[in-house]
Image: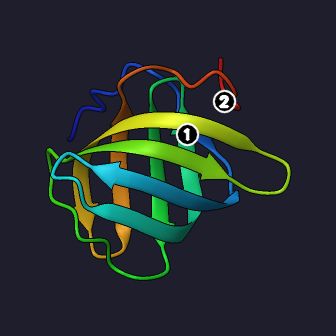
Amino acid sequence: MLKNLRKEKRVPIRLKLHLQAEDGHGRAISANIITVNVSRSGICFQSELPLPLQVGDSLRGRLESQQFKTDIHLRVMWINGNLLGGHLESTPASWPIR
């Protein structure tokens, strides 16, 4: 049986957001995403199109919708097609989980 190594509870929440960021190589990333779940220090989301990212890449930028805006610094932990899991290097000031 697989052991769940996650230290924080994941909260299933579907938010339609726009990701505007730059990766560690200086490439601009712009995508519409839908969150699958979030935790205090992580996010899982699905993008409409594949993103030019690899595991270990770092993103700095902004997540926003009409109701929600926050700056992020994210490390890509895993990718499965258009689904991506990331670790937030610091909890954003405006984040649904505290």
Q: Are marks 1 and 2 in contact (CB under 8 Å)?
A: yes
Sequence-wise, the earlier of marks 1 and 2 is 1
Could you tell me which secondary element the residue under label 2 belongs to?
loop
Relative horizontal placement of residue 9, taking residue 68 as reference (left or right): left
Q: Write down the residue under mark 2.
A: 95
Which residue is found at the position 15% from the left and 59% from the top? 54
> Is 50 rendered above or below residue 16?
below
Number of numbered discs overlaid on the protein picture: 2
Residue, far bottom: 49
Q: Quadrant of the N terminus?
A: top left
Residue 87 numbered mark, or none: none
Residue neighbourhood size for the residue with mark 2, other residues' Cα within 10 Å, grouped as few (<14), some (14–19), many (≥20): some
Which residue is found at the position 71% from the left and 32% from the top? 96
Q: Quadrant of residue 11?
A: top right
Q: Amino acid at mark 2?
A: Trp
Q: Amino acid at mark 1?
A: Val
Residue neighbourhood size for the residue with mark 1, other residues' Cα within 10 Å, grouped as few (<14), some (14–19), many (≥20): many
- Nearer to me, 62 or 46: 62
> Is 74 rendered above or below residue 12?
above
Report how far apart the C-alphas of labels 1 and 2 lie in the structure.
9 Å
- Provide residue 70's location: percent of width, then percent of height: 64, 37
Q: Quadrant of the C terminus?
A: top right
Q: Write down the residue under mark 1.
A: 38
Which residue is found at the position 71% from the left and 42% from the top? 69
- Provide residue 63's location: percent of width, then percent of height: 59, 49
Residue, far right: 67
- Provide residue 50's location: percent of width, then percent of height: 32, 78
Could you tell me which secondary element the residue under label 1 belongs to?
strand
